[in-house]
Amino acid sequence: MKDGLVAASDIRSKDGSINTDKARIAFQCDKKNKVKEILNYEIDPSISADQYIPKLMITGIDSGISHSFQLTQDLFATGTAKNLVNYKTYYYLAVAYGYNNFSNFNANKPDSSQLIQYLESRTDGKEQPIRIIAATPHPAGDNLYVQNYAEYGSGIKIKRIEGKGNSGVALDLTEDSEMEALQGPNYQSYEPVYKENNGPLLLKVVNPDSIKAGNYEVWFKVDSAYGNPTADSSKGLANYTSWFVTVFGSSDTIFSGNSITEYNEKYLRKYNQTGGTDINWGLAMSAVQQKRPGDNPTLDENGLITSNVLFEDVNNKWLSGVVDEEDKSFNNWIRAGSKFDADTDPLYNDCSMIDYDNFFSQDSNRALFYNLDQLNSFEKVIGGTFAPYYFASNINSELCGFGLQYGNGSDRKNNSIYSVSGVDIVMTPDKALWSRCPVIEMTESTGFTNPYSEGAAFKYNIRKHAGWNKDVDGNGNPIYSSNPADSGMSYFPGYAINVETGERLNVYFGESSFNTEDNGRDLIWNPTTRNITEGDKIKWGGKHVIYIAKTKYDGGAAFATAIRKNVGGANDPDLRAAYRSMMW
């Protein structure tokens, strides 16, 4: 409120909008239900005796209920400095409202359609008039405030004891948990710890002078109907699941009060019958059920949270990638989206550019869209240079050159997009942390009896080259192994971790041995910057493609065994089974 003289009745202008001369919105939250603009329809006698005038009462932000917030700005300040001033009194009013719209307003049937969608509370919930609250900020170090353990919004480290999920948060393991996952023979952090504000629960400080030392445990009461999260029928949803928090060694418990299907930030405190607080931990928490990747194909919220690249030296951004392009580009290697008029050119009919599962129906004379990511969310990962294996092109031919997926359509669908997890991929000069792996031949071989690759190796089989065990001579040149068991084996200069399970994952890479100009024949991950040459011939830096598997790290042993053969075509059972383990 502007000052202490403003009353609750002064907030609204005649047209229903907020009277910004008297009051301004400092914080707002509402149920996430796709309802934003809420209208009331009223007759204004000064205009008409029977014409209903729409009044916009509120524009919701549609992001879920929060029970804590931070105020730092004086919304009525006229200068450039907007911060709240210590020891100055400010005035606030909290207004609750209800929404209903049983039938959209119809001017011809006002008696049987919704006139009042927005209904404002008249009391404070205790049958008392709503009060205007006077609040005075002051420094944290003065005699009004004696504790300063944390700031508002400070996150709490979370250890995952069991379960799996992310609540829509980009997970980030602590360095100790990451190092634990890199150690054999387990190659997993079984109880990973997540950094503050980057764990599978949203747990933060909201009242710094009320936080209590202790070990807090979060338990989930899981919906009994919850099924296999990767099965199409269940969609991985646990609709009636709720949570509760306890302090280890005590009976103090606070329940969520809501299922996890909706965002609801719960202040972890409990009131007694007289209005006092029996429990106040100074914390707030929420956990939100997320839909699987691919379950919202026509919405931006389709399972992708975020992606980014961090460099140790921001002035030396040495890594790039092949950016996916749309339409008839030979860089169209990610097949998410809504394209169906596919071919690059009549001369190149084999190079289909159709996004997966879309087609033109001759029966209905219209395009049908069944792609599981029609708004291209997964074409935006790291600027279009990375994607789930599920969406990678499986068009394999010398003419096209952009095939990255082995097998046929059924193999892709048997490697479901629903089971994709978040991963951390780290590249490091520390050879002790490099990942042992087979190297995949990427030279095109469709239609060839003797491919142009080294040793006439067919695409997607292991490279026919002496293995490399990280040894180099005095000039830095690789020294290759003479052991036949090492053939085709090398090291990826880094590692990958599944941040949801704490597992170290297998990493493989490919190279096109026919392309010696772009380091495609040395069994080392060392791509060049060259992309496409004249005549639409794809080089892609030697096709040093990075593959991240779903499988726990075993030095690539099982995958190497499966592809240590030399077969062409897309129907070899060993290769089909092996490539179904790919995730990114």
Image: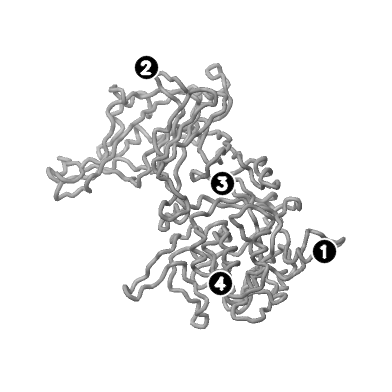
Give the residue at mark 1: 479
In space, the residues marked 1 and 3 are separated at their CA atoms by 38 Å
Q: Residues within 10 Å of mark 1 (few under 14, many from 20)?
A: some
Which label was assigned to residue 274?
2
- Does residue 525 appear to the left or right of 400 in the view shown? right
Indicate the quadrant where residue 10 lies: top left
Residue at 70 percent across and 72 percent down: it is: 513
Q: What element carries label 4?
A: loop
In space, the residues marked 4 and 2 are separated at their CA atoms by 72 Å
Residue most extreme to the left: 49
In space, the residues marked 4 and 3 are separated at their CA atoms by 33 Å
- State which tag comes first along the sequence, 4 or 2: 2
The reply to whether residue 8 is in sight is yes
Q: Nearer the viewer, residue 491 or 203?
A: 491
Give the residue at mark 3: 500
In space, the residues marked 2 and 1 are separated at their CA atoms by 79 Å
* Kind of residue indicated by mark 2: Thr
Q: What element carries label 2?
A: loop
- State which tag comes first along the sequence, 2 or 1: 2
